Amino acid sequence: MEKPKLIIFASGTKEGGGSGFESLVKSAKEGILNADITAVVSSCARGGVYEKANRLGVKFIYFPGPYTAENYQKIFKDSGADYAALSGWLKLVKGLDPAKTINIHPGPLPKFGGPGMYGHYVHEAVMIAYKKREVTHSAVTMHFVTEEYDEGPIFFRYQVEILPEDTTETLAKRVNEAEHKYQPIITNLVVSGQISWNGKDPKTLKVPPNYEFL
């Protein structure tokens, strides 16, 4: 049976960027993620994603914008993909099927999401809330993607305890480790159809029986 095809969007604006993309590719090769990764898209012409794509043998697509629905749709169609996974993609997505597009977020949603809330900004905000005794945990969150930042139906939550000695950097490291562990597993449930929704009504969200991550 032909495997579902997956395109990954990963901005990777820094030298070490693209670690989530790399984790997905390795998991696909190991059989944890039962998908063929057709390409990776980056808004940075060089950097971590470019380097990792070349090393892993994955087609690299440079996407400098404009970030219109037409351009997203062309990239997706030309890649032959069935699904799109955002993994550190910082631009607003337009025009892709919300039932076939997913994102991973390094913090608890909806409180720590929205425009400008990505990467270290999320971890900083979580640590400030922790010091005010407003939260005890951060989280890894995965959701379907609509045309509003971090607003699609959530289908995965994994809490990461905040330790008294934590800094923004140490918390970020543990959240990132959890992302790499669970992102391929949960992405596989999406591309295999075990997690789904109709792209319109959040109440249509379906997850496997005895699913523990919501």
Image (cartoon, rainbow, N blue to C red):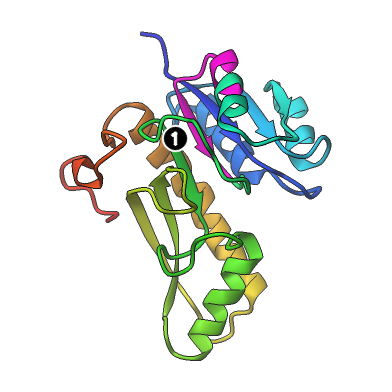
Residue 150, x across and y down, in percent: 46, 54
Q: Is residue 117 above or below residue 104?
A: below
Residue 119, x across and y down, in percent: 62, 60
Q: Is residue 100 above or below residue 212?
A: above
Q: Is residue 82 magenta?
A: yes
Instruction: Point out the image quarter for the N terminus.
Output: top left
Q: Is residue 205 visible?
A: yes
Residue 88, x across and y down, in percent: 61, 47
Q: Which residue is mark 1?
A: 101
Q: Is residue 116 magenta?
A: no
Which residue is rendered at x = 43% and y = 74% of the image? 137
Rendered image quadrant of residue 72: top right
Q: Which range of residues does the magenta coloring cover?
A: 75-87
Q: Report helix, strand or loop for mark 1.
A: strand
Q: How many C-alpha atoms fall within 10 Å of the one at disc 1: few (<14), some, or many (≥20)?
A: many
Instruction: Point out the image quarter for the C terminus.
Output: bottom left
Is 55 in front, or is 64? 64
